[in-house]
Image (cartoon, grey):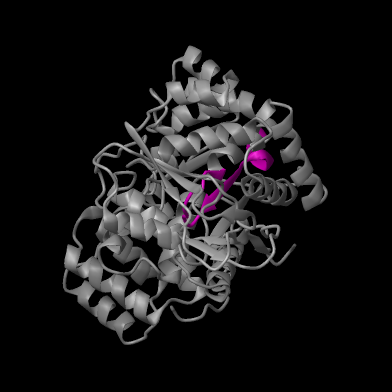
Amino acid sequence: MAASMTRGTRAPRRPGDLSGEGTQGLPNLSLEPKQLPELIRMKRDGGRLSEADIRGFVAAVVNGSAQGTQIGAMLMAIRLRGMDLEETSVLTQALAQSGQQLEWPEAWHQQLVDKHSTGGVGDKVSLVLAPALAACGCKVPMISGRGLGHTGGTLDKLESIPGFNVIQSPEQMQVLLEQAGCCIVGQSEQLVPADGILYAARDVTATVDSLPLITASILSKKVVEGLSALVIDVKFGGAAVFPNQEQARELARTLVGVGADLGLRVAAALTAMDKPLGRCVGNALEVEEALLCMDGAGPSDLRDLVTRLGGALLWLSGHAATQAQGAARVAAALDDGSALGRFELMLAAQGVDPSLARALCSGSPAQRRQLLPRAREQEELLAPADGPLPAGTVELVRALPLAQVLHELGAGRSRAGEPLRLGVGAELLVDVGQKLSRGTPWLRVHLDGPPLSGLQRRALQHALVLSDRAPFTAPSPFAELVLPPQQ
């Protein structure tokens, strides 16, 4: 793990205040190539980079004078030696200032909120939470990402809806917020281009798990949104970047601390990612389940996480007196149809044919399945027939092997830009804690290609963990909320 963070002495900035730093916020600093090795060596040897050092490095990344090998070397030096809080804050600001700043009407200032997740399996929270928050009076300019590796991407899920367009200019984003109250878009070249370059380099240099780099990447995209409040869902467990809650808590505290240093109210939720969230994994299947949640139904763990994260955001932004009141308002938006109505408005505003948006948001689950991409085949897996007892209790469904097999089947990508099989996925036919008779179906796999191989079947069966204890109620994935100092 990276070195621990210590608070810097800079005065906090107003959220989104990137002024006073030259063109597009970046100073006119240019590094000669001979200076880059000195900066790399300084951080490699445990030194502290000054504000000018960090801003110069980011400027060199953006203008192309930094070679790919130099970028990779600096990222590894940061990964091994860490950054203190002030260094991380400066890096976050420099990344944010590398592109265009989003500007909104002054009247929206207290309404602007967002949520970010570090990535999980079956995590379709953003699809539900953005329209639910809009139904509660917020403006949600959500900049999301694509899936890479075993975790799914919000943009890929939305693109399984025919016509949905994730590419929107800042001007178009404002129109979307006026019309629907929320939008979910991709990171464009106009917004935080330096982060796009470093993000791609981190993925191929084994520096994905660096606390300062994760923090700067997440918060730089949020700083440009000019938010009033932000909640970050930090996953931990077998299918998360961080395997245990202690490591996740370190990242959470870093995100909250740097956010406070930048004048942004950030809370970080620690949530378990050992089993999939909800019952569906895969792009189109997760859209179906998100719609079910916005019907006021669907899996309890998904609804619980949506309402808790939303409640925290409404409280942080001053829209609710307590987290519990905020959670109740989000739950009401799911139950009374107002979240679903905002989702329909967002779909139509982002390119979906209005008649299709209406059919998706008003149809039955069976009708919705006909409107979204479907895999050609389905296979069901049965609970193992051998065992000392005729039935067992579902102790766990491991998310990681399930996601890895679906990735092999085309639901995920190994390289940026790879096409996806949007209908490929899996439905859990059981809940953690329930009794399961041996030899009965527990998983339905949706696939396009040849039947599951023996290796894939064994991997999936390994995901199912049975015990002989009595049935139980599965705990909420929500474990802890790390709050900013003033809260």
Q: Position of residue 234 (x, y in %)?
A: 54, 61
Front-most of 155 and 31? 155
Quadrant including the C terminus: bottom right
Write the residue at 53% across / 77% down: 5
- The quarter holding residue 296 reads top right
Per the rendered image, the range of residues in magenta is 106-125
Q: Position of residue 173 (x, y in %)?
A: 48, 31
Q: Position of residue 6 (x, y in %)?
A: 55, 79
Query: In this rendering, does residue 272 appear at all?
Result: no
Write the residue at 52% across / 55% down: 438
Total labels drawn: 0
Write the residue at 52% across / 29% down: 174
Q: Is residue 170 above or below residue 390?
A: above
Front-most of 76 and 191? 76
- The quarter holding residue 60 reads bottom left
Q: Is residue 210 above or below residue 103?
A: below
Q: Is residue 285 left or right of residue 132?
A: left
